[in-house]
Amino acid sequence: MKKYKILFFVLILFIVSGCKSIDQKIDDSREQVEKDMKEVSNINVDTIKRDLTYLEANMEKKQNENTLINKLNYLYLLGDITSNNNSEIKELADTYFDYLKDKKKYKNKVNSLLDDIKSNEDELVFKYYSNYVIYEVLGPKINGYKEMNVDESEEEIVRGVNYIAANIEDPTKDNEVVDRISYYSVYLSKCEKDNIKTLGNNMIIYLTSLKAEDKSNVYKYLNEILLSYNLDLTY
């Protein structure tokens, strides 16, 4: 009996230490992923889709565990940092962590969530991405510039209009673009000229929604202004 008790406690110790090992890997990975996410170019729809595919394809491959945990942390942090970013993707990330510690118990739940996500992947991924970018990246930048005083000048207006024209299709290309496009959007919104002010206000609306219809409104005013300033329309 004593022998069996010893074996039992050894088994328990092994299981607990195994779980701690996974927890440590998750914590270590999260530190690095958080650093990587400070560069906004590392956050995009295609990466989210690729990571979802990787999670599904590598559920049973322990030799890929470290890479899997990195990708899982990426998806997890996109939802965890933003309080309103609740979705099937966030639930998948939470459940997948449990799956790594108890595969038998959580395997069916993970597969079910993966199936649900695949049935509406494009919409769910874009919403997950845009919620993070709007509330954690673009929103704070825009709010940070709203208190600035504007010394309106034709030169700065032209510079701002040109910058928006050049970057409207990818306003989160990198940290520099996020900063400058936010600045110019707020700058133009504070100008006295009605068409310039309208462009700036519509650009702010677009950057805080990332909706296609809001981008279309920006283009309408942008084209008019580019023509009025005789600027290049090939952006």
Image: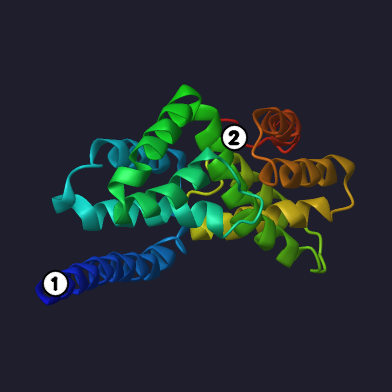
Q: Is residue 235 visible?
A: no
Give the percent coordinates (x, y) of residue 78.
51, 53
Q: Residue at x 23, y 41 (%)?
A: 58
Compared across the picture, whether 114 is left or right of 169 comes to left
Q: Are marks 2 and 1 in contact (CB under 8 Å)?
A: no
Classify 191 as above or below 109: below
Few, some or many residues within 10 Å of mark 1 (<14, 14–19, 20+): few
Name the residue furthest top: 119
Residue 2, position as x, y percentages in the image: 13, 77
**Residue nearest the observer in this picture, 11 or 3:** 3
> Which of the labelled discs sits on residue 1, or is there none?
1
- Residue at the spot 51% in from the left edge and 45% down from the top edge: 91
Quadrant placement of the N terminus: bottom left
Which quadrant holds the C terminus?
top right
Name the quadrant containing residue 167.
top right
The residue indicated by pointer 2 is 232
Q: Amino acid at mark 1?
A: Met
Spatial CA distance of label 2 from label 1 is 87 Å
Residue shown at 23% from the left, 58% from the top: 66
Is residue 164 visible in the rendered structure shown here?
yes
